[in-house]
Image: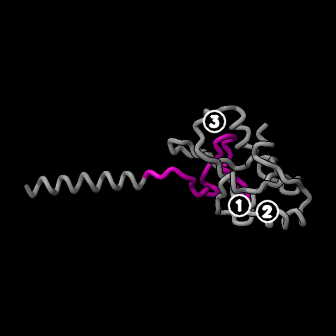
Amino acid sequence: MKNLISTIAAIFMIVVLSLTSCTVGPQKIKIGVDVCSSCRMSIADNRFGAEIVTKKGKVYIFDDIHCLTGFMKANTIDNKEIKNTYFVDFNEPHDLIESGQAFLMKSTQLRSPMGGNIAAFSSQDQLNAASGKLSGEQVTLEGITK
């Protein structure tokens, strides 16, 4: 009986640990380590970048929003399989913003890795502050993926 209880407890712990380790969400981008899922270049600039997380939990990392939009336009994966899209916060380079919460600005003065020249901000106020320093226009993900 003691062995049965120990076995059940061990199985329970394995199930609990495997369920808690399977998070479906964005991952921190590792500069100089991670590679863009589209252009295959090493991620080098921590102010730019994006991620796609699928419904199954697969994460695709991009060095530039331009690479993300090209990946989506090419239907590299079925867009119905995308759970969410995230952008690197230009002002907080290690933070990711859900695409629906991000404010995007396009400016040639941004000089992003692949020439998309789009930065993401976590608030309209932050975008406005950046617009005061860089000439650019506010854009949307829908507008740039058409």
Q: Residue at x 67, y 47 (%)?
A: 62
Instruction: Identify the mark at residue 89; answer none if there is no mark.
Output: 1
Q: Over which residues does the magenta segment extend?
A: 22-50
Give the Cα distance between marks 2 and 1: 12 Å
Label 2 vs label 3: CA separation? 27 Å
- What residue sits 51% from the left and 45% below the top? 57
Answer few, some or many: residues within 10 Å of disc 2's Cα (few below 14, many 20 plus, some between 14 and 19): some
Q: Secondary structure at mark 1?
A: loop
Q: Earlier in the sequence, mark 1 or mark 3?
A: 3
The amino acid pointed to by label 1 is Asp
Which sits earlier in the primary sequence, circle 2 or circle 1? Answer: 1
Q: Are marks 2 and 1 in contact (CB under 8 Å)?
A: no
Q: Could you tell me residue 45's position as x and y percent?
A: 72, 57
Q: Secondary structure at mark 3?
A: helix
On residue 79, the disc is: 3
Proximity of marks 2 and 3: CB atoms separated by less than 8 Å: no
Q: Which mark is residue 118?
A: none
Number of the front mark, 1 or 3:
3
- Please state the horizontal and vertical placement of residue 67, each as a whole percent of the image: 72, 43
Give the label, 2 or 1, closer to the camera: 2
Circle 2 sits on which residue? Answer: 124
